[in-house]
Amino acid sequence: MMDSLWKQGYQRLGLLLTKDECEAVRALYADTAPFRSRIDMARFQFGRGEYQYFAYPLPAMVERLRQELYPKLAPHANRWMQALSLPADFPSGLSTFLDRCHAQGQTRPTPLLLRYRAGDYNCLHQDLYGDLVFPFQVIVGLSRPGEEYTGGELLLTEQRPRAQSMGHAIRIEQGEGVAITTRYRPVEGTRGVYRTTMRHGVSPILSGERYSLGLIFHDAA
Ligand SMILES: [Fe+2]
């Protein structure tokens, strides 16, 4: 079921939101109340464009998606960490996992809404916000590629040990969710499992405006 996640480090999850829901979520961007902070990416040399982290309580649709996606990913997260020979004890429910984050001082919500305009882009990076890291995250496209914007593919690079990196360019449809690996991918080699390092970003938007929703499951310190 999550074959592509295991083999390539990302998995298309199908349509998670309707067009109306996408428009409702991205309309939140203009308001400051739902958010705890706004990041100007150029200021931090993260790229160009803006995003805002949601505050708790999350908007209902964002909360629902985060709650529903976590238990589908958690069994894979445990197998994934085992394959990487890393500690693997993710609980089956998001609330228990977030309790653990909060007990470690990772208390700030990480779901975010991103807005890119022509010329904007996101440099390759990993979203790590503390010692507790869930190995997957989900991106939901909120704009229509080819109609509302051009360019702006989700980029994933995989850095293999002692080898050159490879890349994926992923066009995300409006409402479509894509799960990606946050940090590493276990790869079956001839002498056992080794790990690759994965980073993600967004290629420059050529025209129009592109909104996306990022669902990160661990909270931030
Ligand atoms: Fe990210």
Image (cartoon, grey):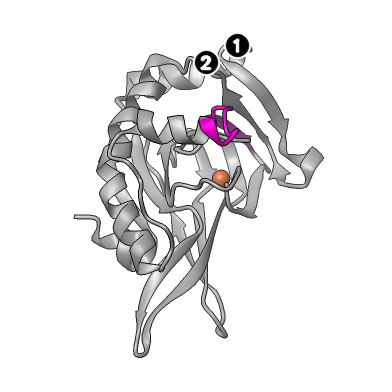
* Residue 168 vs residue 215, the one in the foreground: 215
Q: What's the residue at 34%, 90% (across, down)?
A: 190
Residue sticking out furthest to the front? 103
The quadrant the N terminus occupies is bottom left
Amino acid at the residue labelled 2: Leu
The stretch drawn in magenta includes residue 109: yes
Image side of residue 93 versus residue 34, left or right? left
Q: What's the residue at 44%, 38% (across, down)?
A: 217
Q: What's the residue at 30%, 46% (across, down)?
A: 73
Q: CA distance from mark 1 to mark 2?
A: 6 Å
Q: Are marks 1 and 2 in contact (CB under 8 Å)?
A: yes
Per the rendered image, the range of residues in magenta is 103-117
Provide residue 154's location: percent of width, then percent of height. 49, 51
Q: Residue 28 — which label?
A: 2
Label 1 crowd (10 A; few <14 / some 14-19 / many >=20):
few
Provide residue 215's location: percent of width, then percent of height. 45, 36
Q: Residue 31 — which label?
A: 1
Secondary element under disc 1, as helix, strand or loop, is loop
The quadrant the C terminus occupies is top right
**Which image quadrant is residue 208 in?**
top right
